[in-house]
Image (cartoon, rainbow, N blue to C red):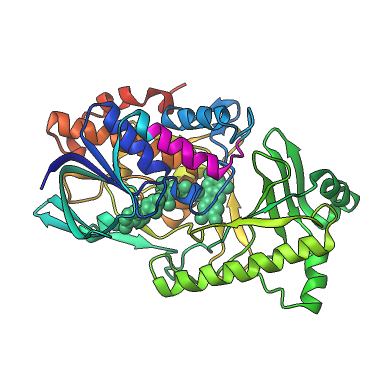
Amino acid sequence: MMNRQIIVVGGGMSGVAAAIAAKKQGADTLLFERYGFFGGTSTASMVSPFMSFSAGNKQLVYGVFQEILDQLLKYGGRKAGSRAFDSETLKFVLYDLLDKYKVDYLLHTYLTGVVREGNLIKEIITESKNGQEHFAADFFVDTSADADLAAKAGVEFEVGREKDGLTQAMTLMFRIANVKMKEVLEYCRKNPENYSFIEEDINGVSIAGFKKEIEEERQITKFDNPLDYIFFVTTHRDDLVIVNTTRSLRVSGLSNVDLSRAQSEGHHNAWQIYELLKKRIPGFEDSYISNTATQVGVRETRRIIGEYTMTGIDIVSAKKFDDVIARGSYPIDIHDPTGGGGQMIRLKEGEYYDIPFRSLIPKNINNLLVAGRCISATHEAQASIRITATCTAMGEAAGNAAALCVKNNVTPVNLDIKELQKYITSNISG
Ligand SMILES: Cc1cc2nc3c(=O)[nH]c(=O)nc-3n(C[C@H](O)[C@H](O)[C@H](O)COP(=O)(O)OP(=O)(O)OC[C@H]3O[C@@H](n4cnc5c(N)ncnc54)[C@H](O)[C@@H]3O)c2cc1C
């Protein structure tokens, strides 16, 4: 069996950034992904736009994420200045970048187990069309979003709210094409009280509302989506919208039974929402569902117990850390696990918080880092750090750190943080 220097498990945005960063430092890196493309939640779950990665006018995330933004623009999957993007273009852009940096990868390969000896992971075990295989490496990065690798290695973790372990609601994203946006806007602006917001800016159009139409629809059909509003945003095109409205409650992303229910509910609700819009809203008459997400959107599952656990207070107090490896400014945004409501707690205007390297280091393992939405954070802190740009920045830091740990033959807790920070200056300063 060939021994790699670094294995990265999970090819979402954090995993792609980790693999590229490690490879840029010259580490022999192999990236694993269970689907047939990269991007994870941003492609398989079709989540767009990138939520804000700025504090006031200060952009917080550059690096690999900026490279992805630039390539999206180049290939027409994003308009200049906009955070909205096309998930299909993103799929191509990520292949292109991984190939540019000559990162080795295996698609359609699912991590199922780990061989651990003492405080070291020796191998991962995978399942694919090849059957079961073992892959050895000196160092591992878990960017599976569910902390699958860490959990299989025996790392302690938490799931969900402190009071009952329930995780945020799931959403099946879907896209509606051939929308006449001018007509939609004209209609909505006639009754602004029917909407939470109608926004039109550099990011495109974003509308949440249609409350009256939903109430009426509930009287005559089985419209049973828990939300009392419909929310959609335009993509790289004004006639193609992404609907972020279905909601499955009391479901766990770690259960195939729950995922099956959420996927099914998502499809039923997506059709109800689409039919309402088509029937009642001018501009949607000739529209059609162009695609539904491959994977129902899972906002939260495991959160590892690491060397430092970020808290909600760290987020809202805009806490800074000496071992900063990424920064964020997104509010604590919790989609109620049990109903249609939610919680949104914002930082002060223009402020941002640091993510410390210690939150990526699982306890009691010497050759593993975790990046993305499953780092060491409370339920509240995770509800902020989970957005895509922040996850990408964490991945970039983890990939760089992994390469340095291998190069310098040190464990993550003993890594010279100043040396790591030199590789990620654009994401932590300025
Ligand atoms: C419905 C929804 C709406 C959201 N809205 C926004 C938004 O508008 N803007 C925003 O910025 N963020 C939003 N987010 C949050 C954000 O999209 C995600 O939290 C973030 O992209 C997660 O990135 P990640 O790299 O940690 O994980 P993921 O993107 O989930 O990547 C994990 C990857 O690992 C792979 N994987 C998992 N397990 C295994 C395994 N065992 N073996 C092999 N591969 C595996 C997966 O297939 C996937 O590709 C939303 C999330 C959801 C669910």
Direction from residue 297 to residue 254 in the image, left or right: left
Q: Is residue 217 visible?
A: yes
Comparing 144 with 423, the one in front is 144
> Which residue is found at the position 43% from the left and 38% from the top?
94
> Which residue is found at the position 64% from the left and 60% from the top?
245
Above or below residue 377? Residue 216 is: below
Residue 336 image point, x, y percent: 56, 64
Q: Which residues are magenta?
A: 83-97
Above or below residue 275? Residue 394 is: above
Residue 311 image point, x, y percent: 42, 49
- How many numbered discs, if any? 0
Quadrant in the rendering for residue 149: bottom left
Quadrant in the rendering for residue 398: top left
Above or below residue 35? Residue 169 is: below
Q: Furthest residue to the right? A: 190
Comparing 271 with 370, the one in front is 271
Q: Is residue 377 visible?
A: no
Above or below residue 224? Residue 195 is: above
Residue 185 image point, x, y percent: 83, 46
Direction from residue 167 to residue 277 in the image, left or right: right
- Examine the residues drawn in magenta and state their main secondary structure: helix
Comparing 73 with 322, the one in front is 73
Comparing 140 with 181, the one in front is 181
Residue 180 in the magenta stretch? The answer is no
Residue 85 in the magenta stretch? The answer is yes
